[in-house]
């Protein structure tokens, strides 16, 4: 069967499999880290108040992020109840929609035929690459603004490049107009997803693309600004207008000045990293397709200079690959010079990487540049071997767990070397084994990691000891999960931030002042200090990083 025919027949089962994978295990782990529990709790407070305008955390206004994710989580809470699963469901939906946007672009790409190199099944392979890219998978299983922004930006840029590509087809102007409308609508949604970056990214990508093409946007693009920008602002204004009307300068200062401009130009929020940070992070987020991405980037000279102006198929493919390069480069450069850097910021780059990788996978033949496949296979074997070595030397993994984790990677690494004439089958097998390995990590490794990063189990232990209603005074800065799991019991300061642990004397003084028991989270190395204090303290449990301690007056 012809590869492109096989790819077409596999599309529907592929999307069923992707959806099942992205929805699977959403409630398996507790919330971890500083962001997930806070975003979920903000949505819960808005849900319980019936207020879709003002985000609050612990009853205090919280203008760090816009409302789109909160609205999605609120809808999920209303349909399925408040839980980790329902809070993460919008992220999973956003991940699937991101994959769908890449497919939407890929299936409209005309085939390039330059003798040997054909983009057969490009939509299928770019979809596979997107769905199995580790960065997209991980962020789609967390309460994350970054995956929502990635989804809205991917659709916005997909509509724009399809509008551009239809200049080389027989499409009528009405259909092209609808593509522009879709672009502006998702531009507005991007503003609702994460603020001003939702318009900076598309503008920068499109501007760089036009520079690469050595041409200005068409006249109709400039005319569309007259109706398109008002359309985007109308979509975004659904939230920005009422929130500014209600809170005025307080919102403008906190949301725009502090969490946009100050965050970008300074290290106010303590996320400083070197300028090359994302050059190191992106290859990890793109796994297991990093080698294919590298090869695709090295081949862009071909797309710039070896296109026949009279060949519409080559024009179409060349413009898409050039657009993907602009989409890849602009966010990388923009965020590299930010004063605040987190891995999630660069997530919108991954669909562009998948479009580039898809081009390499679709053109993969036994006689056409198989070195990325060999490198990918070798990497799988190295990780499989490293897992077993780690098990034997540290004893932190059981042999059974290590074998379960290593087996799919070992199989994925062996197949390309055993069946050198079937690179397409090898790539499909690597994608499938990546999914198997990620599921194994989710169920065998992630629970131990999550337990050390979350307060859920410790608070459950405290509730079993009769402290279900006791106030939480003194949290750990690296763990904000009590704000969700002990909502309404966390003690906040006048600045709207929780009271963080600063030593046992602070906790005992507060306990005596209140004349009631308190719960506090204490670094494990400092737990013994409580036995030396005049009041009584009960160590309820520990997760290896910190312990939960009940402090009572005598």
Image: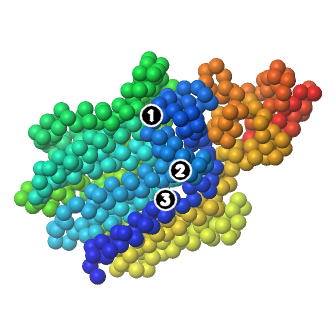
Quadrant in which residue 43 is drawn: top right
Instruction: Relative to 430, say whether 487 is above or below.
Output: above
Q: At which x and y percent is residue 341?
A: 47, 36
Q: CA distance from mark 3 to mark 2?
A: 19 Å
Give the foreground label among 3 and 2: 2
**Can residue 237 be seen in the rendering of this structure?**
yes
Asked if the residue at tag 2 contacts the one at tag 3, i.e. Cβ–Cβ closer than 8 Å, the answer is no
In the displayed structure image, the side of residue 525 where residue 91 appears, left or right: left
Residue drawn where x is 16% and y is 40% of the image? 221
Q: Decide which of 502, 15 is in the foreground and name it.
A: 15
Identify the mark nearer the N-term, 3 or 1: 3
Q: Decide which of 433, 146 is in the foreground and name it.
A: 146
Quadrant in which residue 56 is drawn: top right
Q: Which residue is mark 1?
A: 66
Asked if the residue at tag 1 contacts the one at tag 2, i.e. Cβ–Cβ closer than 8 Å, the answer is no
Identify the mark nearer the N-term, 2 or 1: 1
Q: At which x and y percent is residue 293?
A: 35, 57
Q: Which residue is mark 3?
A: 22
Q: Decide which of 128, 288 is in the foreground and name it.
A: 128
Q: Which residue is mark 2?
A: 79
Give the foreground label among 2 and 1: 2
**Can residue 377 be seen in the rendering of this structure?**
no
Residue drawn where x is 43% and y is 80% of the image? 418
């Amino acid at each position: 069967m012809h590869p492109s025919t096989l790819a077409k027949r596999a599309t529907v089962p592929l999307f069923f499999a992707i959806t099942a994978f992205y929805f699977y295990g959403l409630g398996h782990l507790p919330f971890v880290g500083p962001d997930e529990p806070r975003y979920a709790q903000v949505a819960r407070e808005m849900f319980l108040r019936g207020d879709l305008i003002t985000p609050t955390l612990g009853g205090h206004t919280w203008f760090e992020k816009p409302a789109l994710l909160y609205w999605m989580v609120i809808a999920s809470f209303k349909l399925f109840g408040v839980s980790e699963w329902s809070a993460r469901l919008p992220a999973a939906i956003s991940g699937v929609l991101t994959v769908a946007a890449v497919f939407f672009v890929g299936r409209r790409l005309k085939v390039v035929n330059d003798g040997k190199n054909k983009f057969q099944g490009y939509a299928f392979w770019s979809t596979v690459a997107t769905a199995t890219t580790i960065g997209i998978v991980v962020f789609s299983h967390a309460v994350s603004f970054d995956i929502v922004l990635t989804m809205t930006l991917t659709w916005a840029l997909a509509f724009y490049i399809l509008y551009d590509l239809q200049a080389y087809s027989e499409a009528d102007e009405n259909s092209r107009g609808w593509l522009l409308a879709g672009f502006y609508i998702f531009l507005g949604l991007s503003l609702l997803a994460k603020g001003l970056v939702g318009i900076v990214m598309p503008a920068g990508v499109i501007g760089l693309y036009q520079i690469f093409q050595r041409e200005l946007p068409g006249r109709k693009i400039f005319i569309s600004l007259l109706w398109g920008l008002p359309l985007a602002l109308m979509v975004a204004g659904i939230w920005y207008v009422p929130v500014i009307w209600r809170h005025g300068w307080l919102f403008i200062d906190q949301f725009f000045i502090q969490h946009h401009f100050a965050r970008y130009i300074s290290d106010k929020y303590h996320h400083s990293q070197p300028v090359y940070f994302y050059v190191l992070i992106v290859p990890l987020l793109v796994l297991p397709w990093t080698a294919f991405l590298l090869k695709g980037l090295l081949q862009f000279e071909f797309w710039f200079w070896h296109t026949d102006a009279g060949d519409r198929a080559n024009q179409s493919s060349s413009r898409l690959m050039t657009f993907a390069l602009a989409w890849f480069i602009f966010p990388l450069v923009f965020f590299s010079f930010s004063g605040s850097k987190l891995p999630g910021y660069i997530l919108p780059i991954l669909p562009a990487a998948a479009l580039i990788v898809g081009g390499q996978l679709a053109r993969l033949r036994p006689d056409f540049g198989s070195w990325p496949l060999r490198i990918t296979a070798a990497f799988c074997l190295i990780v499989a071997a490293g897992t077993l070595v780690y098990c034997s030397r540290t004893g932190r993994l059981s042999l059974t767990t290590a074998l379960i984790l290593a087996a799919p990677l070992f199989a994925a690494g062996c197949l390309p070397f055993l069946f050198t004439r079937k690179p397409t089958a090898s790539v499909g097998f690597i994608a499938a084994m990546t999914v198997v390995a990620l599921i194994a990590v989710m169920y065998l490794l992630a629970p131990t990691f999550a337990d050390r990063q979350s307060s859920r189990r410790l608070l459950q232990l405290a509730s079993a000891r009769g402290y279900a209603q006791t106030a939480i005074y003194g949290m750990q800065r690296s763990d904000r999960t009590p704000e969700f799991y002990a909502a309404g019991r966390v003690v906040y300061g006048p600045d709207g931030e929780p009271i963080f642990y600063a030593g046992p004397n602070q906790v005992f003084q507060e306990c005596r002042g209140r004349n009631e028991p308190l719960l506090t989270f204490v670094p494990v190395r400092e737990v013994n200090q409580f036995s030396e204090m005049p009041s009584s303290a009960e160590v309820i449990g520990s997760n290896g990083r910190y312990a939960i301690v009940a402090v009572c007056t005598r």
